[in-house]
Image (cartoon, rainbow, N blue to C red):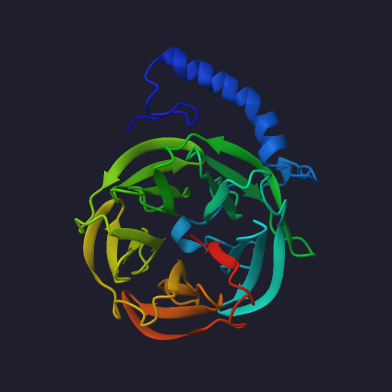
Amino acid sequence: MSHRNVLCSKWMTSFWQCWWVSVMGMFFIGTLIGFAFMTGRAGAYAGGLDEVPANNCPPLHARPRADFNGDGRNDLLFRDQVTKDLAIWFLDKHVRVATGTTHPTRPVDSNWTPVGVNDFNRDCRSDILWQNDDSGNLAIWYMKHANSANVVHRLTGVLVIGMGPEWQVVGTGHFGPDHQDHYPDILWQHKTTGEVRLWYMQDTVILGEMGITTPFPSAEWMVAAVGNFNDDAWSDILWRNRLTGMLRYSLFEGSIEIEFGDVDPPNTIDPNWDVVSFFQVDGDDTDDIVWQNRTSGNLVAWYMNGPTRVSGGFFEPMGPGTPDLKVVGPK
């Protein structure tokens, strides 16, 4: 697999094209992103990168994707659909123990949408991945852990050239061949055809790109979430049919699908429930499916044993109190 700098798109084959884009990109990232996109009205957080811990994090599959306070448990990241502000629920399993926010609370440009939460730079802290609705390009907010006021500050940020606006990031996880990999990969899906492609990542460096062969020939099947059904070292895919709401799963070893089938049960009775996340809610060895109601905003967890639901229940409290707050991570 060939390495390529994230500032050179796959359509730039000329050395001088890539050199020019790289030089200009590095010049403008600090000013354009640091000021226009990343800072907001309050300005960028001044914390130094020397506060980043040593790279001694356990492998991806052995740690939570969205741990914003460093307690070893996943938290929920919300986005207000009206104000575009982010909000955090700090969790103990399905129970909210505190609320918090990020600083800044949103990008200046409202055309950026949060599409993933993971530790992209291997500093043992969860970061936020954004995608631009117009260009399809990506940006990563590298985050600190929450302070005593439950505010999660952004340390810095970086741009990544995307695959175009017709491609949507649908999840992050570990699909690389090394089961001890420490960096999350990025999963894409074409909005029209349903084609799925994978970026192997090392922080912001794209190590390689490949297509994922899906067992479902219809473009109606969309990636609902990325998680782990079987407690191995690799991520799996949860699919949902956008017409019928049916759920299916694919188990992976690296990027190779080894099993697929129907989730049991294959759907909810009420079509107003959306799959919004897939992570270990109850602390056992397999990830659980998190649903959010479009009307009430309430949250329900399906506690899974592999692809089979064994029980379920509401979060505490049942929801954020408004349907405007949508869960956007872990993802």
Q: Quadrant of residue 275?
A: bottom left
- Number of callouts: 0
Q: Residue at x 47, y 48 (%)?
A: 183
Image check: 273 left or right of 263? right
Q: Residue at x 59, y 20 (%)?
A: 24
Work out whether 227 lies above or below 198: below
> Could you say which is closer to the camera, residue 150 or residue 113?
113
Residue 48 horizontal/vertical position (percent): 75, 42
Work out whether 66 lies above or below 210: below
Q: Is residue 259 visible?
A: yes
> Could you say which is closer to the camera, residue 282 or residue 6?
6
Residue 276 horizontal/vertical position (percent): 47, 67
> Could you say which is closer to the camera, residue 286 or residue 242?
242
Q: Residue at x 28, y 59 (%)?
A: 220
Q: Is residue 186 visible?
A: no
Residue 269 horizontal/vertical position (percent): 36, 83
Quadrant where the N terminus sits is top left
Residue 264 horizontal/vertical position (percent): 29, 79
Q: Quadrant of residue 15?
A: top left
